[in-house]
Image: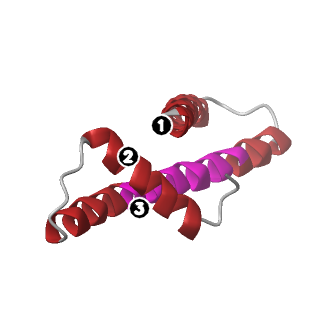
Amino acid sequence: MQESEELLGETEMELRKDELLKNQYRQLLQQKNKPRDSRKSLGASEKLQSLLQEQVEEIKLLKTRTTSLEQQVSTDAKREGIKLNSQQVVDKTARKLRMTSTLPS
């Protein structure tokens, strides 16, 4: 149960980070349309935008991977004749994700 709560907390934190990155990305896009004071700020803004876009893409890939693992866990359980509730699916998915992830846990 504690692991489930930790996973839920991690998931909520990732969602908050995702929203923050999206908001920052939107702000950068708005700034892109404004006149620039100097080339230096333009370069820094473009680098930041590029970095944020990379992070957004990483989050999208992680979400896709998590969804795929959830489906795999559910399919494996059905094949073995095991009924899992949604929390058990989340727990098993989190374990698989941690085992295969290159991200720090």
Q: Earlier in the sequence, mark 3 or mark 2?
A: 3
- Classed neighbour count for the residue bearing mark 1: other residues with Cα under 10 Å, few (<14), some (14–19), many (≥20): some
* Badge 2 amino acid: Val
Residue 1 locus on image (x, y percent): 48, 34
Relative horizontal placement of residue 94, taking residue 46 as reference (left or right): left
Which percent across, then down, holds residue 30?
54, 29
Q: Nearer the viewer, mark 3 or mark 2?
A: 2
Residue 63 painted magenta: yes
Task: Please report whichever mark, 3 or 1, sits nearer to the chain's N-terminal start.
Answer: 1
* Mark-to-mark CA distance, 2 and 1: 8 Å
Q: Which residue matches tag 3?
A: 65
Return the x and y of residue 45 as percentages of the image width and height.
Answer: 72, 41
Identify which residue, 5 or 102, lies in the foreground: 5
Q: In percent of the image, x 73 and y 51: which residue is there?
A: 47
Image x and y of residue 99, in percent: 57, 66
User: Which segment is the magenta one?
Assistant: 48-66
Q: Which residue is mark 1?
A: 4
Tell me the amino acid under the disc marked 1.
Answer: Ser
- Say what secondary structure mark 3 lies in: helix
Separation of marks 3 and 1 at Cα, in angstroms: 19 Å
Residue that label 2 marks: 90
Q: Is residue 47 left or right of residue 75?
A: right
Q: Quadrant of residue 13?
A: top right
26 inside magenta stretch: no
Location of residue 89 with respect to 17 vertically, above or below:
below
**Lower position in the chain sequence, tag 2 or tag 1:** 1
Q: Residue at x 72, y 34 (%)?
A: 36
Q: Are marks 3 and 1 in contact (CB under 8 Å)?
A: no
